[in-house]
Image (spheres, rainbow, N blue to C red):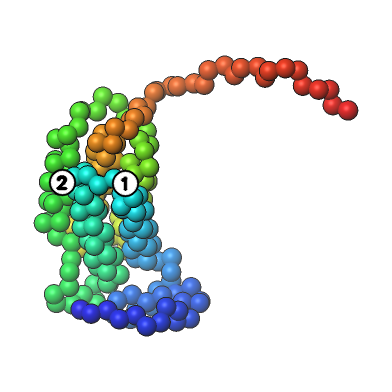
């Protein structure tokens, strides 16, 4: 289906409402809007990752990461469209997240995991710019999962949507470790009960207040 956008603003949302696929008007903080809005936020975060990856030196790892993220970003648009479509507006031939998308995420997780040593501790987000933003994307993905779950308490959704988002957050975690590993970046491990060392006294004496 061809899409042609000729006007960005419509003024239709000035009173805090928007429309779903099919024309139904709903508040902008409705569970369905929150769900696909968070998916959109996740997509934007992955766009930042791809921008940093594009600026990185060419390598098989950078190329593979871009292939993976390109696929995910397009699937997130499909997912957003699915979430924007209430049950009474579903049409024949509509693209929906299914088992194949979930299995592809699982295969990619296994592919990247094969390069990594098993974890012996929880890790802290970081490990370079690209891994750090992948960790941020993971947390946004987890929030999207919570928003979508909240939506299911009000309306039915596609059978495989929650599985897809759950698996995607797992993949983003693995991708953060995978890119950190191949970039040779340091991986920060959680140090349980860590406390700051005693502070050093300032050098010299402070001048007395007038």
Residue drawn at point x = 11 percent, y = 56 percent = 100
How far across and how far down the image is residue 51, in percent?
Answer: 34, 54
Is 181 in front, or is 14? 181
Q: What crowding class fits label 1: few (fewer than 14 Cα within 10 Å), some (14-19), or many (20 or more)?
A: few
Instruction: Give the residue pinned by disc 1.
Output: 56
Residue drawn at point x = 34 percent, y = 80 percent = 5
How far across and how far down the image is residue 29, in percent?
Answer: 43, 65
Q: Earlier in the sequence, mark 1 or mark 2?
A: 1
Which of the 4 image quarters holds residue 122? top left
Residue drawn at point x = 36 percent, y = 58 percent = 44
Report helix, strand or loop for mark 2. Answer: helix
Residue at the extreme front:
57
Is 95 in front, or is 51? 51
Where 163 falls versus 76 (above or below)? above
The image quadrant where one finds the N terminus is bottom left
Instruction: Give the residue pinned by disc 2.
Output: 108
Do callouts 1 and 2 mark residues in contact (Cβ within 8 Å)? no
The image quadrant where one finds the C terminus is top right
Where 104 falls versus 157 (above or below)? above
Q: Is residue 115 left or right of residue 153?
A: left
What label sits on residue 87 in the rendered view? none
Q: What crowding class fits label 2: few (fewer than 14 Cα within 10 Å), some (14-19), or many (20 or more)?
A: some
Residue drawn at point x = 24 percent, y = 28 percent = 119
**Could you tell me how many numbered marks the image carries?**
2
| Cα–Cα gap, marks 1 and 2 | 22 Å
């Amino acid at each position: 289906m061809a899409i042609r956008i000729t006007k960005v603003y419509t003024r239709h949302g000035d009173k805090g409402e928007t429309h779903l696929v099919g024309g139904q008007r709903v508040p902008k903080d409705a569970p369905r809007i929150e769900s696909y809005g968070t998916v959109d936020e996740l997509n934007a975060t992955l766009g930042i990752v791809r921008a940093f990856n594009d600026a990185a030196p060419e390598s098989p790892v950078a190329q593979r990461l871009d292939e993976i993220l390109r696929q995910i970003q397009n699937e997130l648009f499909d997912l957003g469209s699915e979430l924007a479509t209430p049950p009474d507006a579903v049409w024949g031939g509509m693209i929906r997240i299914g088992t194949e998308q979930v299995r592809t995420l699982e295969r990619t997780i296994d592919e990247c995991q094969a390069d990594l040593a098993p974890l012996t501790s929880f890790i802290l987000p970081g490990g370079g710019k690209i891994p750090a933003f992948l960790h941020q994307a993971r947390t946004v993905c987890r929030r999207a999962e919570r928003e979508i779950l909240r939506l299911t308490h009000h309306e039915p959704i596609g059978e495989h949507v929650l599985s897809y988002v759950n698996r995607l957050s797992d993949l983003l975690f693995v991708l953060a470790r995978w890119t950190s590993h191949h970039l040779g970046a340091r991986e920060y491990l959680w140090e349980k009960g860590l406390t700051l060392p005693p502070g050093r006294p300032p050098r010299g004496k402070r001048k007395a207040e007038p």
